[in-house]
Every structure is written in C-alpha cells, then in structure tokens.
C-alpha cells in the first residue's frame, strides 16, 4: 500500500481517463435505453444517475486543477520536471557528440615525425639508413635521350589529334606543335604553352606557361607570379569542365587583355594631361548611359585580375577631345564641337578607334583608319596621327576653295600644299617620320602673293 501511495499520475492522463470513462458510461446507457426491457421512468433514473456521477467527477477535476495553479509547490515541481527533461536532452546530445568526436579524433591524430632523421638530412645533406633493396631496383625518374625522341613524337601526334577534335577560335593566329607542347598565339594579346595531362588525365589540357603581349614602350605588361599561377589554375579547371576548352581560354584571356589595354590607355591619357598636353586635350569616360568628365575619371580603376565576374559588363569607352577652342568664335566654348577620337571595345570585345569626323590620311589619300598597336600602346602617337589627318583634311578643303577663286589661283603653282621645310632639314624630317610613323611632318599651304613670294598658311597642332 505504501508503494501505491507513492505512485504519481500526470494530470493530463487523469483528464483523459475521466473523459474516456464518461464516454463509455454514456455509450452503455444509450445501448440499454434502446432495449425495450426498461420503462421510461427507469431510463430517466439511469440518465439522471449518469449526469450526477459525471458532474461530480468533472467538479473534482476542476477543483484539482485550480488547486494545482494555486499551490507554489506544484509549480516548482513542474519547473523542476521541465529542467530535468532539458538536462536529459543535453546529456543525450553530448553523448552522441562524444561518440562521433571519438571517430574524428582517430583521423586527426598528429603523425609521429622522424625528427632525428630530418635533422640528419638537414645538417649532412644525406641519409644513410635507406634500405639496400632500393639500390637494386634501379628505377629511373627520367627518360634517356633515345627514349625521349619517340615519346615526344607520339605526344606530338596525340596533341595534333586533340587539336583537330576541338574548335579553335578564329582569333588564334598561330598554333605550333613541337617537343610535346602546343603553342597558341593571339597577335598583340597573349601566348599560351600547353600540353596534355591535367591531373594525370591525358584527355585534359595543362598550361605550362602563359605570356601577355599587351604592353607599351617600356615593355609588355608583367603579371605577378602568384597571380599568373592562380589564373593558370583557374583556366585549367574551367577548360577541364568545358566541351570547348579553347573558347573558354580565349574568352577569359581576351577579356583580361582588353581590361589591361583600357587601363594602359587611361594611364597614358592622364599622363598627357599632366604633361605638355595639359591645356590642349580633355577626355571623358563613356559608360552605359553615363558620361564621366576627364577631371574625375581617374578615380575609376580597371580590374587586372582576370576575374570573369565582370564579363557581362561592357568596358567604358574613352573619348579624347583636342582643339578645344576649335569653334570658340562661332559656337562658344562647348566641348562637344571639338573633334575627338574615341577608343572603345565593341560588341565583340575588340578595341576600336573611331574619329568624330571624316578625315583623310595624308600618306594614302584615302579615309584614315585608326587603330592601337596593342603590343606597344602609344596614345600620344595615335593623337598626333589623328591631328595630322585632321590638319591635312582641313588644308585640302582650303586648297580646294582657293583653287576655285580665279583672282587667287591664276596659274598652276599659285596654291601649293606641301610639307614645311627645305632640303637642308631633310634629316630632321626623316627622324620625325620614323618616330611618329610619318605623321609628325608639318604640312603648310602656300599661296602666291607676287613673284616668288608666298603666304604660308599652317594649322597649329595644339589649338587647330
């Protein structure tokens, strides 16, 4: 009996049992009332007894529930039970974590390093405890000269067959296979030396060396060794996962070269503005729907890491304006009336140089076409050529108008367009041609005044 008095029952269980008993009693009462053995009075008495009994039971439960809410000891016991249940869950989780940690510790054990042997090798440069059977094996890590020749021939054949299986971008100008390697070259951009055997797979390409051809007068752009290795690893991984590995190779390196070209052009233009072209030129960065003035454009830095995250963004174009006072007397100082040359990357990410107006090349007599030598970028030379073509075009227009005037041009030699200078300074003019591509020679328009006297008309290179 003492043990029975110490047993406890949850209040929810007590309520559930009372509800079940009331339901079973009601069910039995209904079944008995369906039978015709009892009279109406007996049925009413049975129903009244059921109601009284159920009412007393529910009143007892209600009193017990109110008592539990009012007694602090019960509330404390409930909190204690909840705390113990939480502790039980924590102990279970801790036991599980210790079990799995035990398996992980087996793998995380630090090896027992052979420190004495390491010190011996470090100090003496030799190790005397190697087994003698290693000498008897006679293994060679490199091939002999007789074995290298047929092996390289087989590797060359394999490289050519792999190159025929994949599609090469049309921009790759040169492909050379020799000595077990394939050299891919894009003029003015990059050279890549490849072979097969990425991660031991002869079907995947491995990059041995990579060289950028983009540069300026001081030489090609140099990538840091760490950055070049990181770029090579990323290219190898992307090529291994692609069906067109050389398209991936070209697209990434081409975007890197375009970014380097635009960055070099920007630096050279800023140097020109700080130097002798300070008051003679202006520049603007033209992005998608925005235009940045040349004064603040220097804060924009171009990415040189070769990261492809910005592949979807178009490089901003650079507009270099010269002859800033070209229409000052007629249309004010609006910079939009000044001639300019725009350097931009087109939809195909090829660098293009476009002049604002039609100009004639003095060397060919045809429409001038402008381009950048990507292996030796020289913005000043490009600017001088644009100015020379514009000067030549304007002098041609003036020559044409003066030739139509019968009072000025009465004979064939009255209006002459020629290079400025005489025979005595021909050497200096040859040096000027060689240094600026033939566009540094000053052109003048000679108009006969009387006899052998001419009026010389020339256009200022800085202000037009």
Image (tube, rainbow, N blue to C red):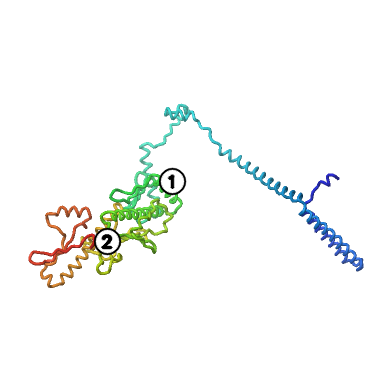
Q: Quadrant of the N terminus?
A: top right
Q: Quadrant of the C terminus?
A: bottom left
User: How crowded is the residue under tag 1: few (<14 C-alpha within 10 Å), some, or many (20+)?
Assistant: some
Image point (37%, 41%), residue name? 150
Residue 20 placement (x, y as % from top left): 81, 58
Residue 186 placement (x, y as % from top left): 33, 53
Q: Residue furthest left?
A: 451
Q: Secondary structure at mark 1?
A: strand
Q: Is residue 447 visible?
A: yes
Q: CA distance from mark 2 to mark 1?
A: 52 Å
Q: Nearer the viewer, residue 283 or 378?
A: 283
Q: Is residue 164 visible?
A: no
Image point (54%, 36%), residue name? 110
In the picture, the disc for residue 58 is none
Figure check: 430 above or below 27: above
Instruction: Indicate which disc, 2 or 1, sits on the residue closer to the N terminus.
Output: 1
Image point (29%, 48%), residue name? 218
When asked about the image quadrant of residue 24, the answer is bottom right
When asked about the image quadrant of residue 423, the answer is bottom left
When asked about the image quadrant of residue 409, the answer is bottom left
Image point (40%, 45%), residue name? 226
Instruction: State the count of labels.
Output: 2
Q: Residue furthest bottom?
A: 406
Q: Nearer the viewer, mark 2 or mark 1?
A: 2
Q: Are marks 2 and 1 in contact (CB under 8 Å)?
A: no
User: How crowded is the residue under tag 2: few (<14 C-alpha within 10 Å), some, or many (20+)?
Assistant: many
Residue annotated with mark 1: 198
Residue 285 placement (x, y as % from top left): 35, 60
Residue 237 placement (x, y as % from top left): 45, 49
Residue annotated with mark 2: 322
Q: Secondary structure at mark 2?
A: strand
């Amino acid at each position: 009996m003492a043990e029975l008095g110490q047993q406890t029952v949850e209040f929810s269980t007590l309520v559930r049992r009372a509800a079940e008993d009331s339901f079973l009693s009601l069910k039995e009462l209904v079944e008995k009332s369906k039978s015709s053995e009892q009279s109406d009075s007996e049925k009413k008495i049975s129903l009244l007894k059921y109601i009284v009994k159920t009412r007393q039971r529910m009143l007892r439960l209600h009193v017990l529930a109110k008592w539990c809410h009012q007694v602090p000891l019960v509330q404390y016991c409930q909190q204690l039970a909840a705390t113990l249940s939480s502790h039980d869950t924590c102990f279970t989780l801790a036991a599980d974590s210790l079990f799995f940690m035990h398996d992980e510790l087996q793998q995380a054990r630090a090896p027992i390093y052979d420190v004495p042997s390491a010190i011996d090798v470090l100090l003496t440069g030799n190790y005397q405890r190697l087994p003698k059977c290693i000498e008897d094996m006679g293994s060679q890590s490199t091939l002999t000269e007789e074995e290298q020749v047929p092996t390289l021939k087989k590797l060359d054949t394999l490289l050519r067959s792999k190159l025929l299986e994949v599609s090469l971008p049309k921009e790759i100008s040169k492909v050379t296979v020799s000595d077990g390697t394939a050299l891919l070259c894009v003029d003015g951009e990059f050279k890549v030396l490849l072979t097969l055997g990425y991660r031991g797979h002869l079907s995947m390409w491995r990059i041995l060396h990579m060289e950028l051809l983009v540069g300026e007068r001081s030489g090609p752009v140099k990538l840091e060794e760490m950055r070049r290795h990181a770029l090579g690893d990323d290219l190898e991984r992307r090529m291994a996962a692609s069906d067109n590995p050389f398209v991936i190779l070209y697209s990434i390196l081409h975007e890197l070269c375009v970014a380097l070209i635009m960055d070099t052009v920007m630096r050279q233009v800023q140097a020109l503005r700080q130097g002798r072209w300070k008051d003679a030129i202006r520049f603007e960065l033209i992005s998608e729907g925005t235009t940045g003035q040349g004064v603040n454009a220097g804060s924009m830095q171009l990415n040189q890491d070769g990261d492809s995250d910005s592949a979807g963004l178009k490089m901003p174009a650079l507009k270099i304006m010269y002859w800033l006072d070209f229409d000052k007397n007629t249309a004010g100082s609006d910079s939009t009336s000044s001639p300019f040359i725009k350097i931009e990357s087109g939809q195909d990410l090829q660098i293009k140089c476009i002049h604002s107006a039609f100009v004639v090349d003095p060397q060919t007599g045809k429409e001038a076409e402008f381009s950048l030598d990507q292996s030796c970028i020289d913005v000043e030379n490009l600017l001088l050529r644009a100015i020379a073509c514009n000067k030549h075009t304007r002098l041609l227009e003036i020559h044409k108008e003066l030739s139509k005037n019968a009072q000025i041009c009465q004979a064939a030699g009255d209006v002459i367009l020629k290079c400025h200078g005489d025979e005595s300074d021909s050497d200096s003019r040859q040096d000027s041609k060689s240094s600026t591509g033939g566009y540094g020679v000053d052109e003048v328009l000679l108009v006969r005044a009387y006899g052998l006297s001419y009026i010389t008309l020339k256009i200022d290179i800085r202000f037009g």
